Amino acid sequence: EIVLTQSPGTLSLSPGDRATLSCRASQSVSSSYLAWYQQTPGQPPRLLIYGASSRATGIPDRFSGSGSGTDFTLTISRLEPEDFALYYCQQYGSSPSFGQGTRVEIK
Amino acid sequence: QVQLVQSGAEVKKPGSSVKVSCKASGDTFTNYVISWVRQAPGQGLEWMGRITTIVDIAEYAQKFQGRVKISADKSTSTAYMELTSLRSEDTAVYYCARVPHDWGQGTQVTVSS
């Protein structure tokens, strides 16, 4: 089983700041099968990035994904008020798994 | 885009079973791999298993082996997740998804005596 560890657990930032979220895998993950989601209370996860770096339909270009192997990053270039939420990474290749999440909160 | 519409909330007794449905539209159902993911209150996302509809083969997370069954009915474009021997820790929102792109709205399952 591939364990995904997200860091930090909580990120306290201000609107306009840059956010950098990390997702580290216990073993190599195919980049084709690494996704990032945003979740707000009471809602299903919203896909942001798939294939490690491809933005999903309708996702603003302030969201970007990068990385390969065991280290992946989600970057939000300038935080908007609606970006303060929970973020999860997922590997959806063999025996899928999720990271435990990073909360982006207003400082 | 694929739309996934799940069945409504359920309240179950410990030891019983629950079966949640997920009806798909918008694409050819046999092209799908439908996953089930759950989220306990205040907790993260947990992958339970998935079914590849074209070959009707399901695979499960080790944690749920023997207690979950995922199936699909191609004639109605509907996937199902059945969880047995329910306990209070199974109280959660259950999602179906065509990972990573499309997600159902979630089904609240509450296990309480």
Image: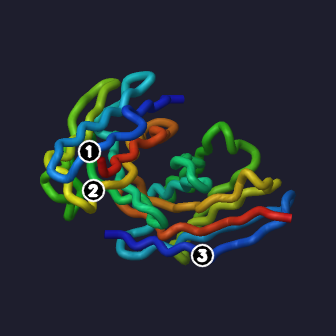
On screen, residue B27 above or below A45 = below
Q: Name the residue under label 3.
A: B7
Secondary structure at badge 2 equals helix
Pinpoint the chain carrying mark 1.
A
Position of B12 with respect to B47 (left or right) is right
Q: Which residue is drawn at 24% across and 56% down?
A: A56
Q: Which residue is drawn at 57% across and 53% down?
A: B42
Residue B55 in the image, given as x and y percentages of width and height? 52, 54
What separation in Å lies between label 2 and label 3 (alpha carbons)? 30 Å
On screen, residue B23 above or below B46 = below
Q: Do labels 1 and 3 share a chain?
A: no
Q: Name the residue under label 2.
A: A83
Q: Can residue B55 be seen in this view?
A: no
Secondary structure at badge 3 equals loop
Nearer to me, A20 or B94 = A20
Residue A47 in the image, given as x and y percentages of width and height? 33, 56
Nearer to me, B6 or A65 = A65
